[in-house]
Image: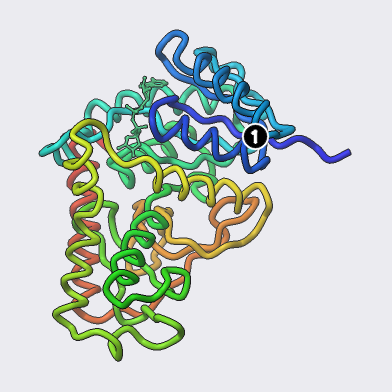
Amino acid sequence: MSVRKKVSVIGAGNVGSTLAMRIVEARLADVVLVDVVDGLAEGKALDMMHAASITGTDKRVVGTTDYSAIKGSDVVVMTAGLPRKPGMSREELISKNAEIVRGVASKIKEFAPKAILIMVTNPLDLMTYLAQKITGFNPERVFGMAGLLDVARFKYLLSEELKKPASSIEAFIVGSHSDKMVPVAGVTTVGKKPLRDLLPREKVDEVIAGTRTSGAKVVSLLGKGSAYYAPSAAAYKMAEAVLNDNSNLFCASAYLRGEYGLKDIYIGVPAKIGRGGIEEILEVELTEEEKSDLKESADGIRDSLKKVGL
Ligand code: APR
């Protein structure tokens, strides 16, 4: 009999509950959904179990406010926090979400000390850094989700522009999960052909600008809350890579020890993800302009870190 896998999802809001549903419906693992609001996680889990009677799954989801339920988790995904409101910068969220992350990370340290921790709460790179400090986990066991999401948005815009399927596109994005992210155009390929041979520079720049504002566009269209279908899909793929020890190459917010000339920072880079968390960081070639954009992106993260006293 195979050992049951367990994922705990902290935060039963839009991202957390959609993620829990994806995990259970794909039969990836059992799920514990935790939220601070009484009844919220429990109610959503119950609704999902009712759905499971229709869709069919051998996996279970339970909802609770009690952190001791996360004991024995293989993976914890942290989505608790406030979503960005229209017109609000990610940085404005810092102090509120830092307070939430401090509290939740100490519970994770207490009840799930062996888990791999995937962060989703924004501002992502900052909250991932904070969570690693509070848990004291080996930095490879803590990483942030957003790179895969940003790459997905980049691929979507390119696929629309070029009328090619997103699945034929290989792309990387480095830097922070913010409007200072750095899509690496030089290593992007479409159907194995270099992007620069397919699209003029101005068009590539337009797509990059559109990628940087994709999240904000969803926020302004929704009018309330922020994106959750794509964020939950990205978190799902990362949890899957860990649980199935896939060594998949994804862009993720990872702890750097000198790669890309940066140290003691969490920032988006291409990385292999498997059972141990971040297994390897890839250093893709950057142009001088991209290097300088990456430095600017890192400086932005460091400024924000100072604001929360880290
Ligand atoms: N412990 C557990 N849950 C908490 C806590 C806490 N200390 N504080 C807040 N929450 C819960 C809220 O009660 C809410 O149900 O986190 C949930 C957040 O859900 P939403 O407001 O729907 O936000 P969501 O869209 O899911 O985004 C969550 O992901 O993409 C990021 O920027 C986004 O940081 C935000 C996070």
Give the residue number, with chain letter if any, for mark 1. 55
The correct choice, above or below, for 12 with respect to 142 in the image is above
Q: Position of residue 109 (x, y in %)?
A: 53, 28
Residue beneath the point at 47% across and 47% down: 233
Judged from the image, the quadrant occupied by ligand 1 is: top left
Which quarter of the picture shows residue 246?
bottom right
The correct choice, above or below, for 43 with respect to 136 in the image is above
Q: Which residue is at the far bottom?
A: 197
Viewer-proximal residue, 104 or 47? Answer: 47
Q: Which residue is at the far top?
A: 38
Q: Which residue is at the far left?
A: 87
Using a 10 Å C-alpha cutoff, classify the residue at mark 1 as few (fewer than 14 neighbours), some (14 to 19) or many (20 or more). few
Q: Position of residue 93 (x, y in %)?
A: 21, 33
Viewer-proximal residue, 264 or 88? Answer: 88
Viewer-proximal residue, 306 or 175? Answer: 175
Residue beneath the point at 24% across and 50% down: 301
- Quadrant including the C terminus: top left
Residue beneath the point at 36% across and 67% down: 155
Colour mode of the rendering? rainbow
The answer to whether the beta carbon of the residue marked 1 is less than 8 Å from any atom of ligand 1 is no
Q: Position of residue 108 (x, y in %)?
A: 52, 27
Q: Position of residue 58 (x, y in %)?
A: 74, 32
Residue beneath the point at 20% across and 58% down: 180
